[in-house]
Amino acid sequence: MIYPRYRALPRFAVALLFWALASSAVAAPVAASLYRDPNCGCCHKYVEHLRAAGFDVDVQPMGDRVARFRDAGVAPQLSSCHMMRISDYLVVGHVPLAVIAKLLDERPLIRGISLPGMPIGTPGMPGPKTEPFVVRTLDGDVYARL
């Protein structure tokens, strides 16, 4: 059963993102570079999700995934199917828009965030949410729980 307060969550997340961007006095769309495996369909859906929210996403091939994550300083347990560079941060995996908005608004002194794996119900991963989402910093600390 979906409770009524959760039905508005996607709209709330998009509204929160736009509020964060407006409050930061960003005049142009937020630019992001997303590195993905060309054979991964969920990455394409995540890119569509970001673009629908107003991001200017440049998609690049991931290449050697293990090497790319290692070179970026992302531990294997925090990796996912794609990695995005946005502003001064790395965003790994299917991180919801509300958490990206929080990151860009708060500007914490961290290298980035990750939602490890490919949890069902996250942006780009079809299906209902089946578990709590725990977004971590790249140092492994909890950044957000959804």
Image (spheres, grey):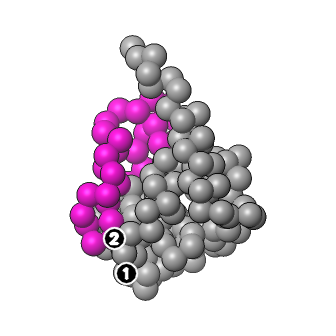
Callout 2: SS? loop
Foreground residue, 138 or 21? Answer: 21
Q: Main secondary structure of the magenta part?
A: loop
Density class for disc 1 (Cα within 10 Å; few <14, some 14-19, many ≥20) is few
Is the Cβ of the residue at disc 1 closer than 8 Å to that at disc 2? yes
Q: Is residue 65 visible?
A: no
Query: Which quadrant, please, contains the N terminus?
Result: top left
**Does residue 42 appear left or right of residue 77 in this picture?**
right
Q: Position of residue 124 (x, y in %)?
A: 56, 45
Q: Amino acid at mark 1?
A: Gly
User: Farthest residue in the right direction?
Assistant: 28
Q: Image quadrant of residue 129? A: top left
Real-space Cα separation, disc 1 to disc 2, in angstroms:
8 Å
* Residue 19 in the image, given as x and y percentages of width and height: 59, 48
Q: Is residue 84 above or below residue 126?
A: below
Q: Specify the quadrant of the image occupied by residue 63.
A: bottom right
Q: Tell me if 71 is positioned left or right of 63 in this view.
A: left
In the picture, residue 143 is in which quadrant?
Answer: bottom left
* Residue 38 in picture, x, y percent from top left: 64, 63
Could you tell me which residue is drawn at 52 percent across and 54 percent down?
Answer: 101
Q: Which residue is mark 1?
A: 73
Residue 88 seen in render: yes
- Tell me the SS state at disc 1: loop
Reading the image, the residue beneath label 2 is 138
131 is higher (above) or lower (below) than 30: above
What is the span of residues highlighted in magenta in the rendered image? 117-146
Q: Is residue 143 magenta?
A: yes
Residue drawn at (46%, 55%), measured in percent from left and top?
A: 102
What quarter of the picture does the C terminus occupy?
top left
Q: Residue at x 44, y 21 (%)?
A: 5
